[in-house]
Amino acid sequence: MAIVTATGSGPARPTVRRRRAWVAVLLRAASLPRGRFGLGVVGFIVAIAVLGPFLAPHSATASIVSPFALPSRGALLGGDELGRDVLSRVLGGGWVLLAMAAAATALGVVIGSASGVAAAYLRGRWDTVIMRTVDVVLAFPQLVFALLLVSILGPTVWLTVLAVGFSHAPQVARVMRSAALDVSERDFVKAVELLGVRRRKIMAKEILPNLISPLMVETGLRMTYSIVIIAGLSFLGFGQAPPAPNWGTMINENRIGLVLNPWGVIVPAALIALLTIGVNTWTDAVARVAIGIDREAETATLLELPAVGGER
Amino acid sequence: MSVRRSGARAPHPIIKLLVQRVALGVVTLCVVSVVIFAATQALPGNAAVAILGHSATPAALHALERQLHLNRSVFAQYGSWISGVVSGHSGTSLVNGMPVWSIVGPAAANSAVLVGLSGVIGTVVGVTLGAVVALRKDSLLDHVSSVVALAVTALPEFVVAIAMIILFATVVWDVLPAVSMVPPGTQAWAEPRELILPVATLAIVIVPYIFRMTRAATVEALASDYAEMARLKGLPTWRVLAVHALPNAIAPVVQVIGLSFLYLAGGIVVVEFVFAFPGIGSSLVSAVSNRDVPTIQLLVLVLAGFYVFVNIVTDVVALLVTPRRRLPR
């Protein structure tokens, strides 16, 4: 599945310069047209989600018009299934989704890179145990795995974040392990080993800083999937408890009234779509700069990156 | 001759791979079944309380505990569950008391139709588009399609499904059914009109992956010396593409088609729910919201089995289309 090319190749550089290189990659990605587009779109949606609750004209949970009322002066996007103001619910329903997606991504990337780097560097029994666990988790579709965990843990916000974050970890671990295998064999790692530095410190201070490029790309991909899965779970009815506004839940609540007032569905669906497109476009720009995907030689990279390989 | 004889003594690489993969797949499924069981039933705390809620009467709890065999040891519970799955008697649904297999079986058949149709259509469309665009590299078509593919790749499948409903089943044109009204007992393929939107949604979701990979691999193959040679010999473009470039570009494309089928197994959950299509995905959603543990266990196991199966098929096909990896070493 993951045919792996040398992701972290290139000469080993001291940590300090790496850190600056990491900023340089982001700046160069932001100067690409697609990077600028991605950042702009993400910025726009984040602004709506964060500022929205303060700008909402009405309460997100109060009924002010008749159910599925068409847009009017009082309710610019009309009413939802219970006559609540669609605009206010849209403005109030983004930040929880964003915060959950960010938290799940962070969790998945941290667990995944820790176990991936450990598997690559420690080898032997650790490698076997970690990678076999990864294989088992990867025998489910990611949404099904998250759904299974949610069915056990219950659909509360924090447990959903845990479930989604944990379901990311195996894929991150796989990518990070293959990148770390190469770095672990380099001379500077052997050198600090001879100095007697502890293994945990070698992994954190010597190996991880050399994996910033794949880590950045992987974080972007996981963010896209987090949004897709968390919005999907709320769409399926396993999100926040009902009166709370949430873009995923809104689409499901209001789709019975699609013929009466389509805006209750179209606006949240469009915002989720823009958000995922924005994050994915930005990640693509970062990948092009960081890993150096050339459009002519993207075959190997396409297979390696699950985003474009379609493995969720 | 000597090559052939040595090939006859060692097992053929494809057979060897098949045996290895099937063995590994069976082991994976066994571990997966333990994980599913442990996660759903043997959790710390009482599964009966988790299912019925804390307000349940002791009598109801006792009845459910007997039904789930919770009064026996964990290993005995697992043993009776897994032998039931294998022999086709894996308990009854907690919601309607029907045997779980009688719910999962027809649902699996319907989902198989959905996944099969959308996988095949998505593959044909993706490969064709990819090959055509590869011939027109750096044209306007190439740039536009690459941007569109990048955007569609990121779309959640429920957004695509909702867009399809808005376009074809309600607001814009009202020409297709928005929900599948497949009566219980009939099979999905008896109602082709109900299949159009779910199949189209799933195909749209996988086309970009297959398209991008086909384009990239074909561009690479077309830039090679043998393709150049074929062109210089004066072969028509379609021949260079179909006879020389595509067969060499097909291995990574097969991998991505395999991944797309895996992806469809997750995609059906949301898409079947949107269109109320009676398959594995919508059954899973309702089983999870009803905490119908026996049904959840079997559905997830069936999906995991499909995953293992697709992985094996992908590996074997990828080997079949790469002759240089097929030689016994």
Image (spheres, coloured by chain):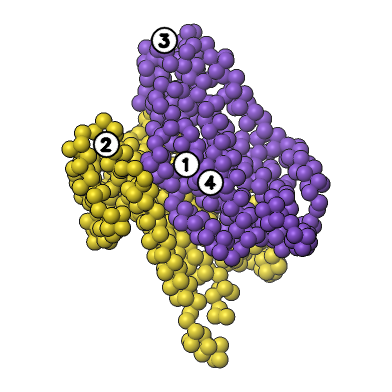
- Identify residue type, mark 2: Leu
**Where is mark 3, residue-wise?**
A64
Q: Which chain is yellow?
A: B
**Where is mark 2, residue-wise?**
B52
Report the disc number at residue B293: none
Judged left or right of residue B236, residue B44 is left
- Identify residue type, mark 1: Ala
Residue A304 rendering spot, x and y as whole percentages: 60, 55
Judged left or right of residue B213, residue A203 is right
> Closer to the N terminus: mark 3 or mark 4?
3
In the rendered image, is residue A251 in sight? no
- The relative height of residue B82 versus residue A256 in the rendered view (above or below) is below
- Identify residue type, mark 3: Ile
**Where is mark 4, residue-wise?**
A168
Which quadrant, please, contains the C terminus of chain B? bottom right
Residue A186 rendering spot, x and y as whole percentages: 75, 62
Q: CA distance from mark 1 to mark 3?
A: 36 Å
